[in-house]
Image: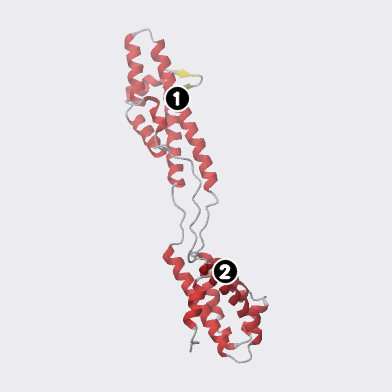
Amino acid sequence: MLLPPHFGELFMALKRLTSGEMIHTTQTWVDRKHRHHQLMMGVAEVAVLLPHVERVHLALLALQPTVDPQAKSRSRILEELDAQHDDMVRAIYYLFLAQIYLSQVTAERELWQRLCDTVFPDGLMVVKRSYADEAGQATLAYSRLSAEDKKQLKTLVLGKESMLVLIERYVQVAQKLGEAATVHYQPTVQPSRADAATARNQWIRVVNAVLAAIDMIPNSEELLREVVAPLREIERRAERRRSTSEPEPTEPLAPPIPSTPDPS
């Protein structure tokens, strides 16, 4: 297809359109109920290009950044699990201290002190670690307990639960916290700048082909007035933006996922 002599200028003008302006322009072209689409379908030279218009229009839509709708929910779950973890650590730690302070036999006091140091070698500092580290430290703590240690922990009963059961629950909460953190920090798949630029350039080429086809056919007053003229006005406004030294439009980056700061 022969292109008009001002084709290069048209390409540059369309390049300055934002993605929103591009989508707005071709939305009526691909809408089968809209008059623009029906006018274009009435001209064979233009109608043959409409499948390509729909393809590039959908490509632009698909490459817009998305926001993860579950991010806030996951963040709230992460906060709740972290609070449970910290409560369990403090409860178990202070139960150890109570046994140490209440023991009247030196050997018993030393035994409970050793068990406390085995589970929490850094004391309450474990609640200041990252989520991943908190999860890992709980697993390490349980692995350091010998069969004899676990037997001893069963002897300390609070209500219906022994100290060993409390420690096992602490480990379970920590593991859930680690799993939730892994899911939460998994990034949402977003279009790359290269993919977005490719989609924009394909849209520009197809739209220019449509404009060139309209420009070459006779008796196209309706198409020129109803389809082309609105686009020319958008181009003029884009040129005006350029004259004010605004940067060329680019694909917007996805907004950051709201998250709870992970103490590291």
Q: Residue at x 44, y 30 (%)?
A: 170
Q: Are marks 2 and 1 in contact (CB under 8 Å)?
A: no
Q: What amino acid type is highlighted by mark number 2?
A: Glu
Q: Which residue is mark 1?
A: 90
Q: Quadrant of residue 133?
A: top left
Q: Which comes before the other along the chain, label 2 or label 1?
A: 2
Labelled disc at residue 155: none
Q: Residue at x 50, y 21 (%)?
A: 160
Answer left or right for 188 relative to 146: right
Question: What element does badge 2 sit on?
Answer: helix
Q: What amino acid type is highlighted by mark number 1?
A: Arg
Answer left or right for 225 relative to 92: right
Task: Note whether 210 is above or below 96 in the view shown.
Answer: below
Question: What element does badge 1 sit on?
Answer: helix
Front-most of residues 82 and 36: 36
Cα distance between the residues tagged 2 and 1: 57 Å
Pointer 2: residues within 10 angstroms few (<14), some, or many (20+)?
Answer: some
Pointer 1: residues within 10 angstroms few (<14), some, or many (20+)?
Answer: some
Q: Which color scheme did the rendering employ for the protein?
A: secondary structure
Task: Note whether 194 is above or below 179 in the view shown.
Answer: below
Q: Position of residue 221 (x, y in %)?
A: 65, 87
Front-most of residues 49 and 156: 49
Do we see residue 64 in this rendering?
Answer: yes
Front-most of residues 90 and 154: 90
Q: Residue at x 40, y 12 (%)?
A: 101
Task: Note whether 114 is above or below 31 in the view shown.
Answer: above
Q: Position of residue 83 (x, y in %)?
A: 49, 32
Q: Which residue is mark 2?
A: 21
